[in-house]
Image (cartoon, rainbow, N blue to C red):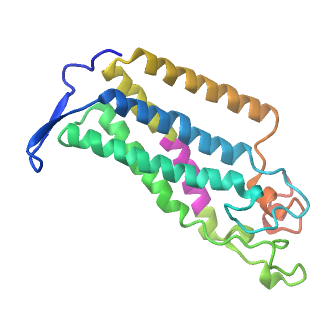
């Protein structure tokens, strides 16, 4: 690996500790590639393409990390929690090393990525309740027991999905911009090859998943494909 550009600090002095520390930008870059180019797209891929196929009654058990049918959701949720924890640590180190916001293209992309990623974690807590006609604990003959933000498609749930999904894809776009601009400054050929190669692998994998029809509808996978379910009825023309 080669040395970073001359304007990038190689050490930082911390007044509170009274000493200087070397900054290994190769480690920072490697961490961010693994987080934003490998782990985050993997979490999104699992959520989008590894849901169980829609069935007559959907997933009956409630969401739990202990239930195999919810593995796709658990991997997405906790994988992104881990990604944000690592990303915040990496961003904090870079912020200290550059003694604040540097104003570079990379800094803008990186800040947008971290802020949007944090917003995704916050917005995930607003998804509301699940509900469902056939879920465990519900009485198929009593509609009052079916109620839930996801099942009845409340305004809250619609807003959550619109914001969470759209911002999620935009966050990944910013992340690729952040990592790409970082590698342009640091001049690390091996890591650059990994960055480009991994991006191409994701494009190829997503094309294969789409070709095989693996992007199952989340509502139908969760609640069943029958038209007795509100959102299926609303989309019966699809």
Q: Name the residue rendered at 83%, 82% in the picture.
A: 143
Is residue 101 at all visible to an observer of this figure? no
Task: Work out whether residue 232 or residue 43 is closer to the camera in this orientation and state it.
Answer: 43
Q: Looking at the picture, how far across and down is residue 164, in whole percent? A: 56, 55
Q: Position of residue 111 (x, y in %)?
A: 34, 43
In the image, residue 167 lies in the stretch drawn in magenta: yes
Q: Quadrant of residue 154?
A: bottom right
When asked about the image quadrant of residue 140, the answer is: bottom right
Residue 191 lies in the magenta-colored region: no
The reply to whether residue 146 is in sight is: yes
Residue under the point 35% across and 21% down: 184
Residue shown at 37% from the left, 48% from the top: 88
Residue 17, x across and y down, in percent = 12, 48
Quadrant of the snapshot with the N terminus:
top left
160 up-or-down from 137: above or below? above
Range drawn in magenta: 160-171
């Amino acid at each position: 690996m080669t040395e970073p550009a001359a304007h990038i600090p190689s050490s930082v002095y911390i007044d509170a500790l009274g000493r200087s520390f070397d900054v290994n930008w190769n480690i920072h870059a490697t961490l961010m590639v693994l987080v934003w180019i490998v782990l985050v797209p993997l979490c999104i891929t699992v959520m989008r393409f590894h849901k169980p196929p829609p069935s007559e009654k959907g997933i009956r058990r409630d969401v739990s990390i202990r239930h195999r049918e919810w593995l796709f959701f658990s991997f997405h949720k906790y994988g992104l929690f881990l990604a944000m924890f690592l990303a915040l640590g990496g961003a904090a180190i870079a912020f200290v090393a550059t003694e604040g916001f540097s104003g570079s293209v990379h800094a803008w992309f990186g800040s947008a990525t971290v802020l949007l990623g944090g917003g995704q974690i916050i917005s995930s807590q607003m998804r509301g309740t699940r509900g469902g006609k056939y879920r465990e604990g519900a009485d198929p003959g009593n509609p009052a027991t079916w109620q839930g933000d996801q099942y009845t498609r409340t305004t809250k749930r619609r807003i959550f999905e619109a914001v969470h999904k759209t911002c999620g894809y935009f966050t990944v776009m910013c992340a690729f911009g952040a990592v790409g601009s970082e590698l342009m400054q640091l001049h690390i050929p091996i890591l650059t090859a990994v960055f480009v190669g991994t991006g191409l692998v994701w494009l190829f994998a997503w094309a294969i998943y789409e070709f095989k029809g693996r992007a199952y509808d989340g509502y139908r996978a969760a609640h069943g494909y029958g038209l007795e379910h509100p959102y299926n009825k609303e989309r019966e023309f699809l």
